[in-house]
Image: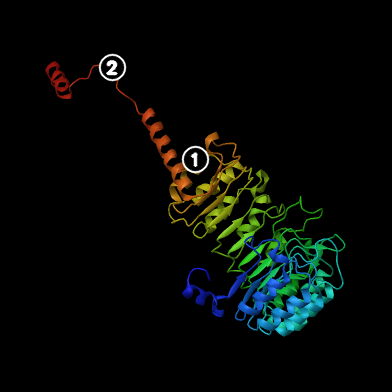
Amino acid sequence: MCSVCRLWRDVALTPKLWHSIDLSSLWVGERARSDQHRLHWLVENRLSRTQELSLGGWKVPGVPAALETIATHCPELQGINLSSWTRLTADSLRSLVAACPRLSRIDISGINTESTNPRSAVSLSSILGLAEFMGERLTHLVLASNKLAGLPQIVIALATHCPCLEVLDLSNVRTLAQTTAPIAIERLQEGCQRLRVLRITNSQISLAQTTLKEQASSPGFPNLEELSMAVDGRGCSQVPVVDNSSLERILKNSHQLRLLDVRGCTRVSDSSLVRVPAWDLEHLFLSGCYATRPTGGDGLELIARKWVHSLVEVDLAWSTATDALDAAIYALADKEYQSPLRVLNLCGSSVSLGPIQALLESCPHLCSLNLSSCRALPRGMKRLYQAASEIDVLRASMRGERLERNNEEEPTPSEDTPVTDGVAEAEGVSATV
């Protein structure tokens, strides 16, 4: 912007403009992300008022010096992304947290992906010390894509010292022993009542066994808005044990839930999903879970009817329960509601043509529809529609085909059949009488 004109240059040099900075995107070249001098200059000359700083993927050789510069020149820093900083140590992270009193959001994902290092920023002692030192200040903690030791102790430490925690991301976490780590979810519910986002997708995590009395006395997560616990069996040898009981324990009193992702959870049934306490769910991902299989029952329709008024995005890919799936799509197309549905993934499913026609007529806001590999549909329809304009073309073509079909079914008078006048015929009958 400095090259446009003098006024634009003055605006670009204003510290208030540099409020949220994302330097982890592909717009920043690989060479620039390893240039420590450029990072020092940028921090010292532009980022004095920065509150959000994302440096994911940077590979600066001198990590302690870089973090010291950030701590010195960014006094208003509230959130930082240091994902994939494999050289980040516990001492460097602790110094940054101590020097930035407003820092409350930390992303240290992808630090240790293959092995554990006792001096690493994501070692057991480092995270335990971080939770105790930050205490109520810590609101966002992202530990995704790390190999962690002592995960149960980490969860207990967060529940004990961090009552203001709102976001906890433990996606793609591997344990040191390559076995599932049991976490005390009731302890986390008691200690972190403000938790809004919990992600344990594809992680070696299970819920620790507890008594029914402790489960009943737990307050749940009353402010939880997002729960991601999807499973990809191809990604790990031992998938997390997620069943109906686990889902019920986690979502206790979660009436504000907006996103639920249980893809690949083969032990989560339709009856458990129907009992989810939230009534205004917006994003629902069910691909590969037990409810979408032929033996999963007919509860898909009940699930769709419960949230038809609020669902914006639905994933039913690879669903093979044809009758239940068709009934669910018809429920989403219920004309009693002004459907807000925008994204629907039916890739590889056995959905029929009739429900798709009803859906297109009743969902005017639909902007993404995936019909790839749907074996029951005509060959020309089996693709991904990624824009509202493409869906409009599909909707118009299906209307035209239906009109042509109706015209072909209407009876036409034969040329050999004489057309008689109704009045003359009536007079003839009277004369005969």
Left or right: where 188 falls relative to 371: right
Q: Is residue 297 above or below residue 34?
A: above
**Mark 1 packing: few (<14 Cα in 10 Å), some, or many (20+)?**
few
Q: Are marks 1 and 2 in contact (CB under 8 Å)?
A: no
Q: Is residue 359 above or below residue 211?
A: above
Which residue shows up at 38% across the image and 28% down it?
408
Q: Which residue is mark 1?
A: 354
Q: Is residue 258 above or below residue 15?
A: above
Label of residue 42 in the image: none
> Residue 239 at what x, y percent from top left?
78, 56
Q: Which residue is mark 2?
A: 415
Residue 193 visible, this orientation? no
Left or right: where 401 falls relative to 283: left
Q: Secondary structure at mark 1?
A: helix
Which residue shows up at 56% across the image and 79% down it?
15
Q: Quadrant of residue 254?
A: bottom right
Which residue shows up at 43% across the image and 56% down it?
338
Amino acid of disc 1: Gly
